Structures are given as C-alpha cells and as structure tokens.
C-alpha cells in the first residue's frame, strides 16, 4: 500500500504539459477545481472528464501510475459514497429495508457524483506534481504569491517549506516500507488481530520513523546553513519564468472550460 502513494513524485518528460510554465499549471489547477465544484449535472461532469483524459493523454504519464496512486484513497471514496447514498433522501425510493436503510435516486446520483468529483480532483492534483519538478513548483508558487510580500508574508519561506515537504514524501514512504520490512522479519504482524492490536503494532514503526525524519531535517538545515542560505532576499534565479505561446493556449482552454461548465450548470446539465 505504501508503494502506491505517488503524491510528490515527478516524472521527467518533454510533453506539452511538462513544458508549461509552473504558474500556468497552478492557475489552471485552481480553474479546474472551481469548474469541478460548479458542475451540477452529468453533462458538466462528462466535459470535465473528457478534458482530464485529454490532459492525461498529452502528458504521457502512464495511466497505471495514476490508478496506482488512487489505491490509498479507496476507503475515503467508499466512506463518502456510503454517507451520500444513505443520508440523501431525494427522489424515488429504490430500496427500503425496515425504514432504516433507504436508498433513493437522489442519494445514488449524489453518491456517484461526489465519488467522481473526488477522483477527478485528486487526479488533477497528481498531474500537477507528476509533470512539475519541486523546484519549478516552488518558483511558480513564490511568483504567484509575490504580492503578499508587501504585507509581510514570508512567501519564499512558505514556498520552500512546501517544496521540501513534497520532496520528502517519497523518501519517508520508502523509509517506512524499510522499517516495516525489518519489523516483519523480526516477527511483527501488521495485518492480523483487532483494530487496537494493529494500531499498537504501528508504534515500533512510528518511533524510528520520527527519529529518522528529525535527523533528516537536522541534516538538511545544517547543509543549508553551510551554503549560507538566508531566505529569498537578494537571491537570483537559475531559470527565469516566462510565459510562452503554449501557456496562452492553455489559459484559453482552461478558462473556456470554466465558462462552458458554468453555462451547463446554469442550464442544470
């Protein structure tokens, strides 16, 4: 299961999505999320799904990598679906068991829509991290938040923290897997027993994991101090961010999608 967590991983490539400015991808992700929450009917969701599949196709990211990353959220999807299925009572009744378990058309529709929304939302977020290196993502985020410096917000430091967090997600997952393998070799059982038993079995994992995380943080801080890192003031950029024709086309497609979905939502489609 741990190896299926792909958030924070970067797949190098030369696809049109990879070549987009990181600011463009961040803005378009926000536009896509807004459009996703605006959608009210199946036609709107179909348009968003077609756009998402088209983006996956031209990004050259293997679909199996995206599907593998969805495995850890299966329980969240099931929980969301069950809540909406049994607690939304609108429309024709499809199932009624002793007036306790009631399934309606509205509940079934809402459950499917909410699950589809979560899947498309997470897939869009994955595409951002899959096609953008942590350094580029940091530069793009810092550039977008740059106006907040005027009110004293430490934009560079916040962006750096997010970059480091994304960078070390795969590292911590790999270290957790190694610790679990070592504990299993010593007879630890993480899969059998009651919920409390399995929770207690995780304690021998958490302690060395936290110690390793703090050690890595200390080593990183020491390395940054040795290189005289003092934040963003007066620092130059190795790569200057510039918008190109491809970014303009992407903006046109993204905002066109937003307008189309908004119009469909107004029509109830």
Image: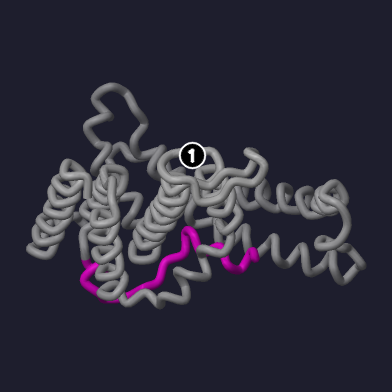
> What x and y, as percent, mark residue 70?
51, 63
* Drawn side of residue 268 relative to residue 244, left or right: right
* Drawn side of residue 221 relative to residue 12, left or right: right
Regarding residue 134, the answer to whether it shows in the image is: no
> What x and y, as percent, mark residue 200?
85, 48
> Which residue matches tag 1?
88
Up-down relation of residue 181 to residue 251 (above or below): below
Q: Main secondary structure of the magenta part?
A: loop
> Residue at 49% of width from left, 46% of height from top?
93
> Residue at 36% of width from left, 62% of height from top?
127
Q: How is the image coloured?
A: one colour
On-image quarter of the N terminus: bottom right
> What x and y, as percent, mark residue 199?
81, 49
* Drawn side of residue 211 relative to residue 61, left or right: right
> Mark 1: few, some, or many residues within 10 Å (few <14, many ≥20)?
some
The region drawn magenta spans 1-19
Asked which secondary structure carries label 1, the reply is: loop
Q: Nearer the viewer, residue 262 or 127?
A: 262
Image-quadrant location for residue 172: bottom right
Q: How many marks?
A: 1
Q: Nearer the viewer, residue 252 or 184?
A: 252
Q: Nearer the viewer, residue 253 or 232?
A: 253
Magenta-colored stretch includes residue 227: no
Q: Residue furthest right?
A: 187
Up-down relation of residue 226 to residue 182 (above or below): above
> Residue at 32% of width from left, 23% of height from top?
152
Regarding residue 244, the answer to whether it shows in the image is: yes
> What x and y, as percent, mark residue 4?
58, 67
> Residue at 16% of width from left, 44% of height from top?
267
């Amino acid at each position: 299961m741990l190896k299926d967590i792909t958030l924070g991983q970067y797949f190098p490539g030369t696809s049109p999505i990879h070549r987009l400015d990181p600011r463009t991808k961040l803005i378009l992700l926000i536009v896509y999320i807004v459009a996703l929450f605006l959608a009210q009917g199946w036609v709107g969701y179909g348009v968003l799904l077609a756009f998402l599949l088209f983006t996956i196709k031209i990004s050259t990211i293997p679909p199996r990598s995206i599907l593998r990353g969805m495995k850890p959220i299966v329980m969240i999807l099931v929980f969301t679906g069950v809540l909406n299925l049994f607690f939304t009572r609108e429309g024709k009744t499809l199932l009624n068991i002793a007036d306790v378990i009631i399934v309606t058309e509205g509940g079934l529709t809402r459950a499917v829509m909410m699950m589809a929304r979560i899947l498309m939302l997470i897939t869009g977020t994955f595409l951002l991290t899959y096609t953008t290196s942590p350094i580029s993502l940091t530069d793009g985020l810092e550039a977008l938040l740059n106006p907040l410096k005027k009110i004293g917000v430490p934009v560079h430091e916040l962006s750096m923290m997010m970059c480091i967090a994304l960078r070390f997600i795969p590292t911590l997952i790999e270290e957790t897997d190694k610790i679990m393998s070592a504990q299993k070799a010593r007879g630890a059982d993480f899969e059998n027993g009651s919920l409390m038993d399995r929770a207690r079995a995780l304690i021998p994992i958490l302690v060395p994991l936290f110690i390793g995380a703090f050690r890595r943080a200390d080593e990183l801080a020491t390395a940054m101090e040795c290189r005289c890192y003092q934040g963003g003031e007066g620092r130059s950029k190795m790569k200057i961010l510039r918008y190109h024709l491809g970014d303009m086309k992407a903006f046109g497609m993204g905002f066109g999608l937003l307008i189309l979905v908004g119009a469909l939502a107004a029509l109830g489609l």
